[in-house]
Image: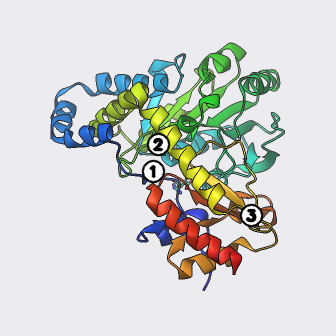
Amino acid sequence: MTLPRNLTQFESLALDSPLNLADGHARSDLTPSQARIVDALPKLFAEAAERPVGELEAEAHRTFLTSLGQRDYPAGAVLSCYSSSVAMQILAQALATRIGTVALVHPTFDNIPDILRGAGLSLIPVPENDIQARGDCVFVTTPNNPTGKVLSEAGLRDLAAQCAERDVILALDTSFRGFDPRSHFDHYSVLRASGCRWAVIEDTGKLWPTLDLKAGLLIASENIGIPIADIHSDILLGISPLVLVLVQRFAEDAAVGGLADLHRFIAGNRETVRSGLAGLPGVTFPDPDSRVSVERIGLGRRSAVDVWSALREHNVYTLPCHQFHWADPASGANTLRIALARPAGTLSAAVRVLRSVLTG
Ligand code: EGV
């Protein structure tokens, strides 16, 4: 068989399997309080139809962002998008009208380099452990996907200062922010204080099992100097007010205990993986501090594509990591990523299969 061309194509193969640990979307069960929100959908539909969209939008943005510690964002500059990848596409196109080179964190999910290159930008890899302001724009995913690596407050302040001094645009993708309280310091107050040109992509899509009803938010500094709002308006008028109301309610639930429940749930599933694979020769967990909803597994000398393929025979789907290493695929050849936002029973069944494949 010819291998899929990118990570999302690997994820597509898994969509119909009950043992899908491939994509990073939330596919866990609704909690009781989330299920009550879903039960109220006809009422939410009516509310979305009646209330002014501007008001729903401002409220959904505020509730979501403040539930994750983000208060100092420019409320008038938040652009709603269907997904964070659509926000990414808009940002990439806007960058390409004025600049040529983006320094991009390495590794990261491959649709980010693909979208940037597709817009005509040249890329320089920057290792996630040594991020510097290079090129015309530096782009960082924090927490990073798949490693969970977080850019600290001091790290962001330093990077923003470098960007201000060298006139480099600072762009962040914070799609996994919700999972890690270490990324809940107010990024916007740090960015605004620095005076640098910046853009941030936020995402509601990874957190809650809302069947891909979600929003990506694109937020930029007033001085960014690229036509983000114009290109956004080329792509869309706005997102569904029903999605805005749903985001609002799930974010309210997150703020009163839902987020803490989610963190416990992901931590429990991570422990299931680590204990379920404990003691296997050569098997390692390269991201001991990660809190995001995916986990990397180091396979020693085994090839990740071979393990992926053997798992597939048992209907278990994962992601080989080579394509996360977009500038050096060989450095991901012996690592597998598995998704943790799955029902606990699904995850433990898949981990038992993984253990037997790695033993054999
Ligand atoms: C992950 C896939 C694309 C993306 C999956 C993802 N979407 N290509 N637009 O949502 O980590 O599995 O980010």
Q: Please say whether residue 202 is visible from this viewpoint.
A: yes
Q: Position of residue 161 (x, y in %)?
A: 78, 21
Amino acid marked by disc 2: Leu
Tags 1 and 2 in contact by the CB under 8 Å rule? yes
Sequence-wise, the earlier of marks 3 and 2 is: 2
Question: Badge 1 local density, few (<14 within 10 Å), some, or many (20+)?
Answer: many
User: Which residue does the image show at 30% across and 22% down from the upper left?
Assistant: 55
Q: Nearer the viewer, residue 130 or 26?
A: 26
Q: Nearer the viewer, residue 73 or 207?
A: 207
Label drawn at residue 279: 3
Position of residue 148 relative to residue 256, above or below, is below
Position of residue 220 relative to residue 23, above or below, is above
User: Which residue does the image show at 55% across and 78% down from the upper left?
Assistant: 312
Quadrant of the frame with the N terminus: bottom right
Q: Which residue is mark 2?
A: 207
Element under disc 3: loop
Quarter holding residue 355? bottom right
Q: Nearer the viewer, residue 245 or 267?
A: 267
Between the C-alphas of marks 1 and 2, the distance is 6 Å
Label drawn at residue 26: 1
Q: Position of residue 238 (x, y in %)?
A: 35, 37
Amino acid marked by disc 3: Gly
Q: Position of residue 158 (x, y in %)?
A: 80, 23
Element under disc 1: loop
Amino acid marked by disc 1: Ala
Q: Position of residue 154 (x, y in %)?
A: 76, 22
Question: Badge 2 local density, few (<14 within 10 Å), some, or many (20+)?
Answer: many
